[in-house]
Amino acid sequence: MAAFSYLWTADTYAMFYRHILKPLLFALRIERAHRTVLLLLRIVGLLPGGRWLLRKCYAADHPALEREVFGRRFRNPVGLAAGFDTGGEAFRELSALGFGFVEIGTVTPRPQQGNPRPRVFRLPKDNAIVHRIGLCNRGLERAVAFLRRPHDGVLVGCNIGKNTTTPPEEAPADYLKLFRNLYEYADYFTVNISCGNACTEGGSHAREQVLRILEPLFDFRRGQNQYRPVMLKVSPDMSDETIDAITDILIETPLDGIVAVNGTHGREGLRTSLTALDKIGSGRLSGAPLARRAVEVVRRIHERSGGTYPIIGVGGIMSAADARAMLDAGADLIQLYTGFIYEGPGLVRDICRALIADAERAAGEPAPARAAEESGQHAEAPEASGPESAGAVSGSRAEEGRSPGSGQK
Ligand SMILES: Cc1cc2nc3c(=O)[nH]c(=O)nc-3n(C[C@H](O)[C@H](O)[C@H](O)COP(=O)(O)O)c2cc1C
């Protein structure tokens, strides 16, 4: 019995995904595999003790993993990125797989079918995915119905976007409708301006377009007695100048932080053959090939904003080393999508274990930031990867007194 429980460790669950579940799921078309996983998770969630069991198998809890970001306490800094649970149907089960938070959406006001299938493709040679889903989701009403259920301590971000058929000049009304109606159910919001259908990927009008969307949200929030942080999600295809312009919005307005990045339209440096890529066609590329640009964008935002605003780093995190690189670049929290598809929930656990090990290793010696301070140098203090990362507190508008009560659900 002892031998059995020794063998049946967390690594066994990771291997179960890699060697049994993943081959089965990868034998299905990716959208069918995705629906199957959501269905299985919901079934497990309905079983008595189901979520408890998932947590037991996959979640790594440790004080060194905890983060305080924009007035919310995160169990760990590894979140699930938008696009996996678009309607919020399984956020509690997904959290039980070890995620410190789950970003649902993109939710649009009305349900939409998205683009014709097939529209999501695996690129196994590149550990990547290409998709042109077109924000397929079941709309605001369904999302509210799912989010009304008890959150049981799970931190939920809500990613919002406009309907494809909404003309750009009416986009602010779509965002405001979503924000108003979801306000009480989300712990933070992500405004998706880098979606295929809105959008503002560059050009000299980026600032005005973004402000037209954000300002009504800030006005609405001022009238509420609970504070909900608003993040802005950016595209890796934005020029550096546009990224700087967006960072300046972060500094100059009540915007709380940035989620960087969405998938790219670029196809540079892939192992997948040109013929295969031509056959797949257009779409956003996510996964390993995105990692370098994602880290670059996060570092740029972090440096320009002086390291004082929350950044969620996402893009190409496929290993604990990738997670460290993202945190070292200045991300306060990170998210996974493609890494979760290729590695399963074991990846969340691997990252958490690596962060615990980093914190424990560093506990006995001066942290880099502290060492730099002691030697009289200015330290940029990457909050996340040394012992500072344990229970790290990251800049929050809420802490600046703009939050009339940022109570957590
Ligand atoms: C199939 C798929 C659907 C996605 N849908 C959305 C979405 O609805 N909204 C959004 O903001 N990002 C969406 N994303 C982007 C992810 O949230 C993430 O930003 C991107 O995939 C980069 O992270 P990764 O390399 O870990 O996958 C989607 C990604 C994939 C692969």
Image (tube, rainbow, N blue to C red):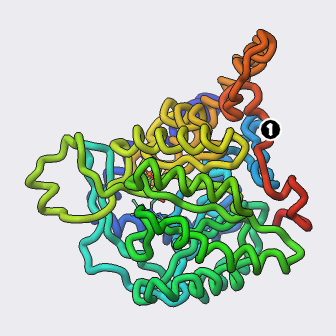
Q: Position of residue 176 (x, y in %)?
A: 64, 83
Q: Quadrant of residue 408?
A: bottom right
Q: Nearer the viewer, residue 44 or 403?
A: 403
Residue carrying label 1: 391
Q: Position of residue 369 (x, y in %)?
A: 73, 21
User: Between residues 266 and 327, which one lies in front from this camera angle?
Assistant: 266
Quarter occupied by residue 130:
bottom left
Q: Amino acid at mark 1?
A: Gly
Residue at 8% from the left image edge and 54% from the top image edge: 275
Please state the horizontal and vertical placement of residue 62, each as a whole percent of the image: 76, 37
Q: Tell me the element at label 1.
A: loop
Q: Nearer the viewer, residue 74 or 2?
A: 74
Badge count? 1
Q: Residue furthest front?
A: 204
**Quadrant position of the C terminus in the picture:** bottom right
Tell me: 35 left or right of 283.
right
Residue 40, relative to residue 260: is it above or below?
Answer: below
Residue at screen point 16% across, 55% down: 277
Dot 1 crowding, Cα within 10 Å, few <14, some 14–19, many 20+: many
Tell me if residue 267 can be seen: yes
Residue 36 appears anywhere in the view: no
Q: Point out the quarter of the image occupied by ligand 1.
A: bottom left
Above or below, comparing residue 21 to residue 303 in the picture: below
Would you identify the image quadrant in which residue 29 lies?
Answer: bottom left
Q: Quadrant of the N terminus?
A: top right
Q: For disc 1, does the CB lie below 8 Å from ligand 1?
A: no
Q: Which residue lies at the image location 30% right of the left edge and 57% below the top edge?
A: 265
The reply, left or right, for residue 395 in relation to residue 115 is right
Q: Determine whether 69 is above or below 91 in the image.
A: above
Q: Is the residue 248 above or below the residue 31 in the image?
A: above
Residue 177: give x, y in percent of width and height: 64, 86
